[in-house]
Image (cartoon, rainbow, N blue to C red):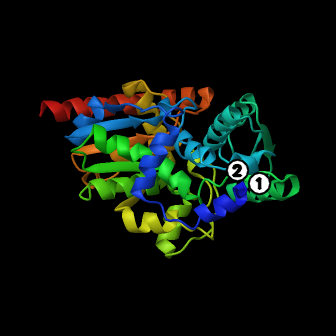
């Protein structure tokens, strides 16, 4: 049987298919929770429709990444990965990879840049992996991971350029259309694009009428910049509350750029104030702890043109890994605004 690198090279020649998403669901069923799709009463009032939150922040690692990472790692030929796994991450994917690697008895190394928040670095270290902190950007972390792949003979796990990630994340889309069959818009945070590519692959196949909307921060959004340019481009990273959305899509991007360009209907950007307010809104009105990336779809619904989103909307809440001190500060800073918004939502309902 060929080693893992040969097997993965073969896998990278294949285009993600909907049938592969169903295979992925069976592969990861013992690892991944079917997460709630919960109605948001205050956002439904504001939007004048039915708004629901897909709470993948409830996964065991507190982020959606367990889906794609689990499918990718569990589909490897383990004999070729005995020396261990190495990846790059802004935190959530790294935690997911370590979670799966521990099940397989494999060592794991996660490379992060200095921009990754201390809370996520601490969570990574507490999971038992080796954390390597180098560079000022996600692209730097990629280069470090590739160097360790060569120097130590580790297997490189790539969360962007591997169709297994896209298909694993596509299982989230399956759950949305099964649990909310009359949904008309699905709103998804976007970084490297594997999540929105997987969701859009499923949604557009099963429900072609449904619109898929991508959301990112308005500073350093690599996928958005690439779509505008018509090709994958590099961007300069900037600090953001939506730190999980930082990082490039790779100039040699083979999957997510094309799939996002073909399958995603709209792409919107939200600013830092809107993200902070959405984090506060989630905590005060939904009693949810969400990190900035997970709150970005809420920010888009609350603070962009609501005509973009239809009447039956699913917002994908991707993760809960936020520093508690930062959360406390954001809630205090935006509490008055959230109260005003809640009052306006009651007024909309009464009228």
User: Which residue is at a point 56% across and 62% down the rendered structure image?
Assistant: 222
Instruction: Classify the position of the N terminus by image quarter.
Output: bottom right
Residue 135 higher or lower than 74, as above or below = below
Query: Can residue 190 be seen from the camera position used here?
Result: no
Q: Is residue 107 left or right of residue 42?
A: right
Q: Residue furthest right?
A: 151
**Residue displayed at 64% across by 57% down:** 237
- Sequence-first tag of 1 and 2: 2
Report if the CB atoms under discs 1 and 2 are less than 8 Å apart: yes
Query: In the rendering, at what x and y percent does residue 276 appear?
Result: 49, 39
Q: Which residue is mark 2?
A: 88
Residue displayed at 47% across by 31% down: 33
Query: Label 1: which residue?
Result: 145
Q: Is residue 232 above or below residue 159?
A: below
Q: Residue furthest toward the bottom?
A: 230
Q: Position of residue 295 (x, y in %)?
A: 46, 40
**Residue 142 visible to the viewer:** yes
Q: CA distance from mark 1 to mark 2?
A: 6 Å
Q: Which quadrant: the C terminus?
A: top left
248 lies left or right of 223: right
């Amino acid at each position: 049987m060929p080693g893992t690198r040969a097997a993965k090279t073969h896998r990278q020649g294949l285009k993600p298919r909907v049938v592969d998403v169903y295979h992925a669901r069976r592969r990861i069923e013992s690892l991944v929770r079917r997460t709630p799709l919960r109605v948001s009463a205050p956002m439904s009032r504001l939007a004048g429709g039915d708004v629901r939150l897909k709470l993948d922040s409830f996964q065991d690692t507190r982020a959606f990444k367990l889906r794609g990472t689990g499918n990718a790692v569990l589909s490897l030929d383990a004999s070729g990965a005995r020396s261990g796994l190495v990846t790059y991450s802004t935190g959530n994917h790294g935690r997911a990879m370590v979670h799966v690697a521990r099940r397989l008895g494999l060592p794991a190394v996660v490379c992060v840049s200095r921009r990754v928040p201390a809370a996520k670095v601490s969570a990574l270290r507490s999971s038992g992996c080796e954390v390597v902190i180098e560079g000022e950007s996600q692209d730097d972390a990629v280069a470090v991971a590739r160097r360790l792949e060569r120097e130590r003979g580790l297997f490189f796990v790539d969360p962007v350029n591997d169709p297994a990630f896209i298909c694993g994340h596509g299982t989230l889309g399956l759950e949305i259309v099964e649990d909310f069959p009359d949904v008309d818009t699905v709103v998804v945070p976007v970084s490297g694009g594997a999540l929105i590519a997987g969701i859009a692959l499923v949604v557009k196949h099963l429900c072609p009428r449904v619109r898929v909307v991508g959301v990112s921060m308005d500073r350093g959004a690599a996928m958005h910049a690439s779509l505008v340019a018509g090709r994958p481009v590099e961007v300069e990273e900037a600090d953001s509350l939506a730190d999980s959305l930082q990082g490039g899509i790779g100039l040699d991007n083979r999957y997510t750029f094309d799939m996002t360009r073909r399958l995603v209907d709209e792409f919107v950007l939200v600013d830092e104030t809107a993200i902070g307010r959405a984090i506060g809104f989630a905590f005060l009105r939904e009693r949810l702890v969400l990190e900035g990336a997970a709150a970005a779809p809420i920010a888009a619904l609350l603070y962009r043109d609501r005509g973009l989103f239809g009447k039956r909307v699913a917002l994908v809440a991707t993760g809960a890994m936020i520093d508690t001190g930062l959360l406390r500060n954001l809630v205090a800073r935006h509490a008055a605004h959230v109260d005003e918004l809640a009052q306006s939502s009651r007024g909309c309902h009464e009228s």
